Image (cartoon, rainbow, N blue to C red):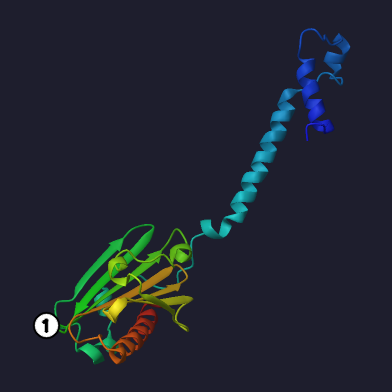
């Protein structure tokens, strides 16, 4: 409040600087009550600001710290992602032109593998991605809906998956034509997406089988890339 003594003294310091209130020579030389030094107030303000800044950094320490990574980078994700469980449903997914990409960025080391069992009217396409975050913790944005499936998911449903990484979630598009499994474990994010055409994955039994196969293949991928 303005009536506090500290603030009253500050206002008195300003008044003491006016030429109409001359200080005695001895008082000026000895640093008496009227000879307040403005730089002391500046130092005090700087100390307060520094303390607040340090407190802010301490509060944000978990977000500023690099996330823990217990997984190695993959040089060829299509080799590390065997997709054996999905292969038991859709056939050999590695036989038909697997596509593999890597991105070695200082902040995020990413890898993508796209598999497909053919181009028939009842084919299954599988897209797998691994992102290793070296700078910031991906947990804060883990629940953000994916843009790639936004149009297909629409009013789809989301299910939590237990016992896989730190957190895992399964997104199911309307009609069960597209599924996405995301797994968070430390600074690593694993994503497996399946897109079905024709009869594959369009019945509840097929959808349940696909979900179980995606979880099984995700668990195998985490184990394969574990350091």
Which quadrant would the C terminus be assigned to in this image?
bottom left
Is residue 189 shown above or below 65?
Answer: below
Look at 84% across and 31% down and name the residue there: 5
User: Which residue matches tag 1?
Assistant: 120
Look at 40% across and 70% down and name the residue there: 189
Q: Quadrant of residue 125?
A: bottom left
Q: Nearer the viewer, residue 134 or 210?
A: 210
Look at 14% across and 77% down and name the residue there: 97
Position in image of residue 69 (x %, y %):
45, 69
Furthest residue to the left? 120
Furthest residue to the front? 155
The answer, for residue 89, to whether it is visible in the render is: yes
Position in image of residue 32 (x %, y %):
87, 19
Position in image of residue 103 (x %, y %):
29, 62
Q: Nearer the viewer, residue 111 or 20?
A: 20
Is residue 41 shown above or below 132?
Answer: above
Mark count? 1
Q: Crowdedness of circle 1 by 10 Å Cα count: few (<14), some, many (20+)?
A: few
Residue 203 lies left or right of residue 48; in this view the side is left
SS for dot 1: loop
Look at 47% across and 70% down and name the residue there: 186
The answer, for residue 227, to whether it is visible in the render is: no
Which quadrant would the N terminus be assigned to in this image?
top right
Is residue 86 shown above or below 73?
Answer: below
Is residue 208 shown above or below 46?
Answer: below
């Amino acid at each position: 409040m303005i009536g506090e003594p500290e603030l009253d003294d500050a206002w008195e310091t300003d008044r003491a600087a006016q030429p109409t209130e001359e200080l005695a020579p001895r008082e000026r030389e000895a640093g008496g009550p009227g000879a307040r030094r403005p730089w002391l107030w500046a130092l005090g303000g700087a100390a307060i600001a520094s303390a607040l800044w340090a407190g802010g950094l301490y509060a944000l320490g978990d977000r500023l710290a690099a996330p823990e990574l217990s997984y190695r980078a993959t040089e060829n994700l299509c080799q590390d992602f065997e997709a054996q469980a999905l292969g038991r449903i859709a056939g050999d997914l590695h036989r038909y032109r697997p596509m593999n990409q890597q991105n070695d960025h200082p902040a995020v080391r990413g890898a993508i593998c796209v598999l497909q069992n053919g181009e028939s009217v009842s084919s299954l396409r599988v897209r797998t991605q691994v992102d290793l975050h070296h700078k910031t913790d991906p947990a804060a944005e883990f629940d953000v809906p994916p843009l790639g499936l936004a149009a297909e998911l629409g009013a789809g449903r989301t299910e939590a998956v237990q016992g896989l990484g730190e957190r895992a979630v399964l997104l199911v598009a309307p009609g069960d034509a597209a599924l996405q499994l995301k797994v968070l474990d430390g600074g690593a994010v694993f994503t497996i997406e399946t897109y079905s055409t024709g009869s594959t994955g369009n019945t509840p039994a097929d959808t349940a089988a696909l979900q179980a196969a995606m979880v099984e293949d995700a668990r195998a991928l985490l184990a394969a890339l574990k350091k």
